[in-house]
């Protein structure tokens, strides 16, 4: 079940270093939102707070509230492992478990949780997830071969299948196409457009055409200088951010006059 995301006054620290400051954003359920901005402005850092991956690093912490629908994922007593099962993540480099079969890669989330599945249940989950990731037809005859035997684009779709297999509410993607060729990139972009019918999707991308193609809303982040915190500068409909932004920094960035 797709959920909305609301950040209220979110500050993100690495030790004493305030990396991202004061983010307020409301992301609707069943939508695709792009995060754009120059390197080092905190896109990845902020994204990783959305499923409590940030705090895995020693000294890393978050202030403020982050709601999934109405529930603060940083509330007392909330288990980060539960949060991560509701908010899945796809990384820049496809990272299937190399020695595991395609089938076991899709089931990896269940295995990590110690779930017991019958052969039939497992088969259903595998087929459904691979179909949802637009990969089923390409791999259905070699489910027991290693995931590492797939092309880069197929591996990334396998990682997406692994993420959707556990039925998350939200899918976070950090530059999911940056290691892929243009054809694989288009396949992933098509897939993202389909995924939003069921999930809330947030994607970090350096490719502005990609942001324009796949997202309905775009958040532009910027940084005033080295050592300064990144901030969300503007958040609006993607067409507004690219064609008629309100903020001069956004305008400079999207028109390529940055830096
Ligand atoms: N593990 C870490 N420890 C300390 N500081 C970090 C760590 N990871 C990132 N930072 C710092 O946090 C700031 C934001 O980095 P982040 O990786 O979020 O930027 P980004 O917008 O994703 O950049 P890019 O577009 O290059 O991926 C930077 O100043 C970075 O050096
Ligand atoms: Mg990044």
Image (cartoon, rainbow, N blue to C red):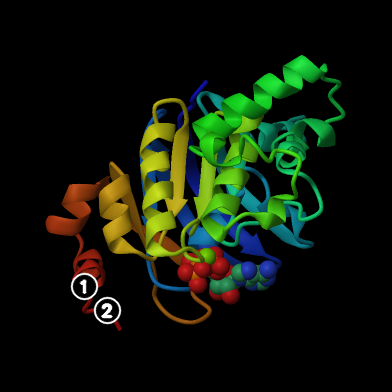
| Circle 2 residues within 10 Å: few <14, some 14–19, many ≥20 | few
Q: Identify the residue at image location x=63%, y=51%.
A: 62
Q: Residue 248: horizontal and vertical position, in percent?
A: 19, 67
Q: Identify the residue at image location x=50%, y=56%.
A: 176
Ligand 1 falls in which quarter? bottom right
Can you see residue 75?
A: no
Position above or below: 100 against 81: below
Q: Residue 109: horizontal and vertical position, in percent?
A: 74, 35
* Residue nearest the observer in this picture, 211 or 19: 211
- List the residue tagged with mark 1: 252
* Residue nearest the observer in this picture, 7 or 157: 157
Q: Cβ–Cβ below 8 Å for labels 1 and 2?
A: yes
* Apparent side of residue 50 relative to residue 101 in the rendered image (left or right): left
Q: Residue 125: horizontal and vertical position, in percent?
A: 67, 24
Q: Residue 7: horizontal and vertical position, in percent?
A: 48, 41
Determine the secondary structure under disc 1. helix
Residue 258: mark in rendering? 2
């Amino acid at each position: 079940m797709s959920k909305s995301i609301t950040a209220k006054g979110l500050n993100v620290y690495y030790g004493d270093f305030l990396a991202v400051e004061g983010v307020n954003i409301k992301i609707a359920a069943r939508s695709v939102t792009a995060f754009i901005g120059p390197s080092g402005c905190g896109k990845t850092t902020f994204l990783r707070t959305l499923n409590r991956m940030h705090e895995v690093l020693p000294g890393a912490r978050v202030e403020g509230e982050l709601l999934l629908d109405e529930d603060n994922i940083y509330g007392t007593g909330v288990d980060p492992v539960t949060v991560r099962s509701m908010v899945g993540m796809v990384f820049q480099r496809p990272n299937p478990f190399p020695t595991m079969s395609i089938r076991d890669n899709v089931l990896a989330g269940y295995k990590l949780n110690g779930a017991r599945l019958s052969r039939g249940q497992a088969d259903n989950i595998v087929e459904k997830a691979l179909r949802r990731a637009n990969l089923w037809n390409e791999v259905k005859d070699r489910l027991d071969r290693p995931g590492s035997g797939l092309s880069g684009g197929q591996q990334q779709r396998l990682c997406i299948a692994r993420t959707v297999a556990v039925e998350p509410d939200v899918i976070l993607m950090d530059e999911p196409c940056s290691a892929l060729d243009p054809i694989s990139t288009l396949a992933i972009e098509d897939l993202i457009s389909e995924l939003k019918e069921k999930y809330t999707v947030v994607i970090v991308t350096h490719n502005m055409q990609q942001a324009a193609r796949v997202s309905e809303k775009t958040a532009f982040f910027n940084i005033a200088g080295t050592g300064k915190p990144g901030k969300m500068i503007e958040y609006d409909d993607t067409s507004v951010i690219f064609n008629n932004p309100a903020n001069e920094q956004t305008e400079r960035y999207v028109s390529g006059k940055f830096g």
